[in-house]
């Protein structure tokens, strides 16, 4: 090699004071010249060099904070809780986009029915969305932080409740906005709320025994079977399905309360369930 970076330039380079174009030449030269790299190591301040490596290690090891996590921390949510919420798989654009599409289609179907009929498709699908969201937010299959959650010193029930509250807040909010798009039905358009809570609470209560996939699947299947049976038994198209009548709403409220009580009684079993690969 015909030339080397001068020692003065190397000292300026180490202090961050070398200016272009000499800086560009020094960068290119140092990548291929072991002699100049050795001189640079001798003239550099070892304390500043160690501090630089420490900052680099910290930057590389530090997890990247997403927009949702930053927003949660800003509104007062604890950092570790915000991290758990931000890692919830269903709080992602793809899943939320799918929920919005389902709601738009069901709202469109509600507007297309003849006058006097109930928006049955919307009322049937809306309760399933929070159940599906909770099912997809917990367990080794989809949770990117599942292994961390298993070894973390946190009650499994608390983690599940944190995720559940986050999912319910988002999905119920979207369902509520979709309900506003059906103003012609008045309070009847809110008939999905109690069944949705009943399905979600029942699915959660069955999770410790059946797992995060089978329990919601069985509950969702039972809901579909109930709707098909109610549809076969109703007198006409202008008559609401049994789950959306006053009596059906009362039953849904009772089921939700009983499931919530059972969930509270079984809360300690979520630690054992959390450690299983389901």
Image (cartoon, rainbow, N blue to C red):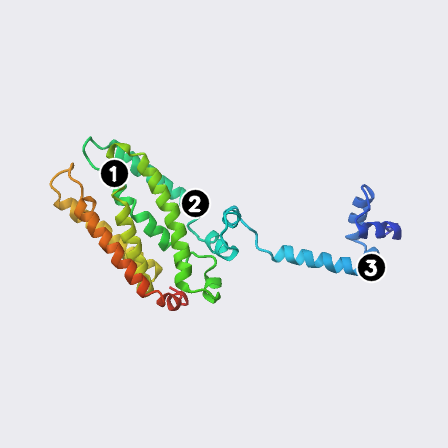
Q: Earlier in the sequence, mark 3 or mark 2?
A: 3
Give the spatial CA distance, label 3 vs label 1: 78 Å
Residue at 25% across, 38% down: 187
Assign the C terminus to one quadrant of the image: bottom left
Q: Residue at x 26, y 39 (%)?
A: 189
Q: Horizontal placement of 255 versus 34: left or right? A: left
Secondary element under disc 3, as helix, strand or loop, is helix
Question: Counting other residues with Cα less than 10 Å from the Cα at mark 3, is it few (<14), some (14-19), or many (20 or more)?
Answer: few
Horizontal side of 202 relative to 29 (left or right) equals: left
In the displayed structure, 107 sits above or below 243; it is above
Q: Residues within 10 Å of mark 2 (few under 14, many from 20)?
A: few
* Of the image marks 3 and 1, the number of the one nearer the N terminus: 3
Residue 35 in picture, x, y percent from top left: 84, 57
Name the residue carrying label 1: 187
Residue holding disc 3: 38
> Total number of numbered labels?
3
Name the residue rendered at 20%, 52% in the picture: 251
Discs 2/1, front: 1
Q: Where is residue 168 drawn, in percent x and y?
A: 37, 49
Alpha carbon separation for disc pair 2 and 1: 31 Å
* Between 41 and 245, the one nearer to me in the picture: 245
Mark 2 falls on what kind of element?
A: helix
Q: Quadrant of residue 117?
A: top left
**How far is mark 3 from mark 2, CA to CA?**
51 Å
Element class at badge 1? helix
Circle 2 is placed at which residue position? 94
């Amino acid at each position: 090699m015909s030339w080397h970076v001068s020692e003065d330039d190397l000292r300026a380079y180490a202090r961050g004071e070398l200016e272009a174009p000499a800086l560009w030449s020094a960068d290119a030269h140092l990548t291929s010249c072991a002699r100049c790299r050795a001189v640079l190591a001798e003239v550099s301040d070892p304390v500043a060099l160690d501090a630089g490596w420490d900052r680099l290690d910290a930057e590389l090891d530090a997890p990247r904070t997403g927009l949702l996590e930053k927003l949660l921390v800003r509104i007062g949510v604890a950092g570790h809780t915000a991290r758990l919420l931000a890692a919830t798989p269903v709080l992602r654009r793809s899943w939320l986009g799918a929920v919005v599409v389902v709601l738009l289609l069901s709202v469109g179907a509600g507007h297309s029915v003849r006058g006097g009929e109930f928006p049955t498709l919307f009322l049937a699908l809306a309760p399933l969305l929070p159940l599906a969201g909770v099912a997809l937010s917990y367990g080794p299959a989809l949770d990117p932080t599942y292994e961390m959650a298993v070894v973390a010193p946190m009650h499994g029930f608390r983690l599940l409740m944190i995720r559940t509250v986050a999912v319910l807040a988002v999905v119920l909010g979207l369902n509520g906005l979709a309900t506003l798009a059906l103003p012609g039905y008045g309070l009847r358009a809110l008939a999905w709320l109690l069944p949705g809570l009943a399905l979600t609470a029942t699915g959660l209560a069955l999770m410790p025994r059946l797992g995060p996939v089978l329990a919601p699947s069985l509950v969702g299947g039972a809901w579909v079977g109930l709707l098909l049976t109610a549809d076969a038994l109703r007198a006409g198209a202008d008559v609401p399905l049994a789950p959306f009548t006053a009596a059906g709403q009362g039953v849904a409220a009772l089921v939700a309360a009983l499931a919530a009580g059972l969930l509270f009684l079984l809360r300690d079993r979520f630690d054992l369930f959390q450690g299983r690969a389901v």
